[in-house]
Image (spheres, coloured by chain):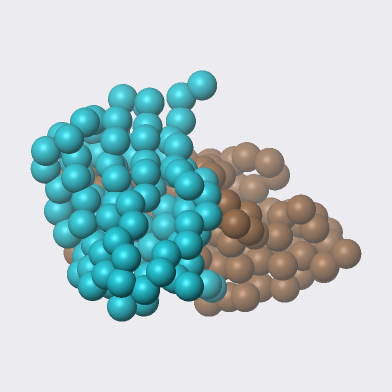
Chain colours: A cyan, B brown
Amino acid sequence: DGGITQSPKYLFRKEGQNVTLSCEQNLNHDAMYWYRQDPGQGLRLIYYSQIVNDFQKGDIAEGYSVSREKKESFPLTVTSAQKNPTAFYLCASSARTGNTEAFFGQGTRLTVV
Amino acid sequence: GDSVTQMEGPVTLSEEAFLTINCTYTATGYPSLFWYVQYPGEGLQLLLKATKADDKGSNKGFEATYRKETTSFHLEKGSVQVSDSAVYFCALSRAGSARQLTFGSGTQLTVLP
């Protein structure tokens, strides 16, 4: 079955550590996205990529970094510069042409301990 | 830029009540419109979509009609169930936009038995 997989589902980070969240898709989608969701809040766009080896900052990119070396993969690193990283992180992908819907992973809940 | 405005939540209904969640949008051109549903601790799932004016999307008893004249895509269900309790997101996709996807802020629905 085609889909988008995020791992791990739960992640704990100590203060001052960098952590990387994985996102893999086998839908052959060009575009991939990372969103942050805080309790009771909507989605905020962190980074997006329309094509391999290219990505753009979203609305809240500070303290985060991404790479897009392969079409299938779009990992997100939460760096120590992110002051309040505890949140639910969602990865999504979509086709790049046409007004197409996005497909979402199951999310990663990151907690700073 | 593109934007999506949803009615403020939370919304609490009794089982078998009628549901309406309002959604209006601003976008140039001809976007596609979507409703996504998010159950607790999970990613977003596509609930229904409409790709052109006057299209009606429907799924699991939910319906929404793409109204270009009022730039609206209101979600309705005639008789809600406890299992419909979730967060509902209205969204648009426009191929000419660099970010392509724009989401509303989400509406929390709680259905009481």
Between B20 and A103, the residue placed more toward the observer is A103
Residue visible at 48% across and 73% down?
Answer: A113
Q: Nearer the viewer, residue B85 or B90?
A: B85
Q: Position of residue B105 (x, y in %)?
A: 44, 68
Left or right of A109 on screen, residue A94: left
Q: Position of residue B24 (x, y in %)?
A: 41, 64
Outermost residue, right direction?
B113
> Residue placed farthest to the top in the image?
A1
Residue at x 31%, y 78% (from the top left corner): A83
Which of the image's four quarters has the C terminus of chain B? bottom right
Count of picture labels: 0
Q: In the image shown, does B29 or B44 lie closer to the viewer?
A: B44
- Can the viewer see residue B5? no
Give left or right: position of B98 versus B90.
left
Residue lying furthest left in this view? A54
Q: Is residue A58 left or right of residue A85?
A: left
Q: Residue B4 in the image: x percent, y percent?
A: 37, 64
Looking at the image, can residue B39 be seen? yes
Residue in view at x 33 percent, y 52 percent: A20
Q: Point out the image quarter for the N terminus of chain B.
A: bottom left
Across and down, in percent, residue B36 comes to 51, 50
Q: Residue at x 19, y 40 (%)?
A: A68
Q: Quadrant of residue B108?
A: bottom right
